[in-house]
Amino acid sequence: MKKNLISKLICSLFLGALSCMVFAQDELSTQNDDYFKQFQDLENGELRSFFFFNTSNRYNQNSPYDWLDTVNVYLNSSEKTKDTTSIRYYQLIQAKIYYDLGNYEKSLAISRSLYVYLDTLDKDVKSSILELMDDNYAMLQLYDKQIEIRRVKRELGLIENVAFYDIYASLGQYRKAMRDYMTEEKKELKDDDYYGQAVYDNTIGNYLRLDKSTPTALSYFKKAEGLVQVFLSDVTNQRTDKEITDGKFLSGLIIGNIGKCHVQLKEYEKAIPFLEESREIIKKYSKGKFSPDLIENTLALADCYLKLDNYAKATDYLSDNINPIKPDNILKRNRIYADYYYKTGDFKNATVYLKRNIKIRDSIDAQASNIKNQQLTSVVTQDLENSRKMMEQQKAQLEESRKDIKARDDKISLVFVSLIFTLIGFAGLVYAYLKSIKNQRLIAEQKFIIENALVEKDSLLKEIHHRVKNNLQMVSSLLSLQTKNTKSKAAIEALEEGKSRVKAMALIHQKLYQNDDLSVIEMQGYIESLINSIQSVYKKGGHNINITIDAEGVELDIDRAIPFGLILNELVSNSFKYAFPQDDSNGKIYIHLRKIVGQEGFFEYTDNGIGLPEDSDERANSSMGMRLMNRLANQLQTSLNTDKTTEGVRFWFNFK
């Protein structure tokens, strides 16, 4: 026992001296430190293990294989001397090195052999073993085992609650993962913890990116990038070597995620600088370690250059000694190879890689769906079990509180009984009490009157909106009658456009009087109704177009909903009339609307039609529709932006 205390004291003194010698902002000194030699100069397995796990950029000069060979020598020596304590520490180092190399099965096998002796080890070693097993099970997609390890960590007091958000993300439940992560982690963040806030925003952004909410994800990544730069440049706090390395590595991950967002948006030229910078940072600060992010960024770069027809660069990255482990990355690499050979006319090799992907998918489809359902069921069951336990604990706490309150009430009752005769003498207090009762009755009566008045007001407002809607429908009917009596094609088109705009406004008032809350309109339902209304006018092409609406949960007041409705009416009508002249069944329209309370909103409309004509800027000055949309955008205190893409057109703007 005394020997262990002395060893820990020596270890603490050693790391304290090491931290004092490292200058936080000096990256060159970090790279020039010979950690391998410092590791060898230490006396025993405990000190070496402590040093190893607290040195983040340990492979800066010597590869993991050099470390592994040296650790094996120390392990053999400890086995000969039967030094069981050192044996455990060297096995733990072995397991971590295999994990860094991406050999998760080997790492897990060693970790499980140490797990048997968990009760005999100190808290820090227990934590390292369980953390390593947790990470290995995650990489091997054994989520039920991962849950068991987390339960053990909670029972040992290493964590307070068992979290599942990363497991849900691995199973493709990104929205669920994001909600759980925000619930678990946001409450623990401090205002001055810039690194923690950067990790938080990067994780949220990654879940949104994987869920294809790319513009929103991009905003989170940019915020995270700013926070990590603040963390690294904060001169008020001296950073350790490990903190600087972790911050730089996180910066590389964030920059890579920004690049992957631009790839999803098909902005390949914009994505390339981010992805290349990310690769260099990750290589520098995870030297010798297997990095899935490095593989993903490399494949993304190859894909970008291939899309830009730069075959030389694409093949350079494809042959950059990448060995993907995840099936998704293997499939992506094969798909890029197939695209490359197809573009270069080598159809035979293209077919070979496509067949490889078919075999992999067949293999995955044969087992993955069932396994994934089993894993998801296991996770949900454990999640519900944890929720049930938390509810039971809360129920027990409430019951305890109820008992305390009852005990206090009993004491108060006894005091009240003892003082009852004294209170009789205070007639004035009784009078005041009776008067207060009378006042309460008056307040209750006034409250009742006010509530009835509010109900009557709501009814009148609903009636007003109903009548406005009916009047607008009457206008629409009059326009329809006028259309039947008009022979001019231009006049008929103008009347139809006017009728469509009137219907857009009528829908606003219809939604208002149908809502319980008369102040706002739920935009998802309104947009769906508006699309159906426009499709009824343009029956020929409207029903063959795939329309995606992403406005779930967005509510706007009438002052903003009417301009939105009219702008959207013009955009959809123009798409139906002009964007798909061949009545293409592959036509797509995407409508995206986001508004978070207290933040700036975002609206985006895209279609993959024939796009705007070359003289669209000149037509915009003479087109009533474009002038109308610009004026409506001015009402929203913004301006309408137009992007001409390779396929179709994109309109967007931010609003308050």
Image (cartoon, rainbow, N blue to C red):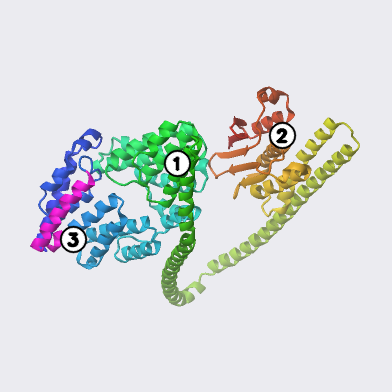
Residue 206: x percent and y percent?
44, 46
Report whether residue 379 is seen: yes
Query: Tag 2, which secondary structure?
Result: helix
Left or right: residue 358 versus residue 67 is: right
Judge whether residue 78 is colored magenta.
yes
Instruction: Give the residue at mark 2.
Output: 578
User: Mark 2 and mark 3: span between their CA atoms?
Assistant: 72 Å
Instruction: Give the residue at mark 3.
Output: 88
Q: Earlier in the sequence, mark 2 or mark 3?
A: 3
Q: Amino acid at mark 3?
A: Arg
User: Mark 1 and mark 3: span between their CA atoms?
Assistant: 45 Å
User: Mark 2 and mark 1: span between their CA atoms?
Assistant: 38 Å
Furthest toward the right, the residue is: 485
In the picture, the disc for residue 337 is 1
Of residues 497 and 418, the one drawn nearer to the viewer in this rendering = 497
The quarter of the picture where the N terminus appears is bottom left
Q: Earlier in the sequence, mark 1 or mark 3?
A: 3
Query: Tag 3, which secondary structure?
Result: helix
The part of the chain drawn in magenta is: 63-87
Residue 456: x percent and y percent?
74, 55
Of residues 245 and 142, the one drawn nearer to the viewer in this rendering = 142
Residue 441: x percent and y percent?
64, 64
Q: Magenta-highlighted stretch: main secondary structure?
A: helix
Q: Amino acid at mark 1?
A: Tyr
Furthest toward the front, the residue is: 348
Dot 2 surroundings within 10 Å: few (below 14), some, or many (20 or more)?
Answer: some
Query: Tag 1, which secondary structure?
Result: helix
Figure disc tally: 3
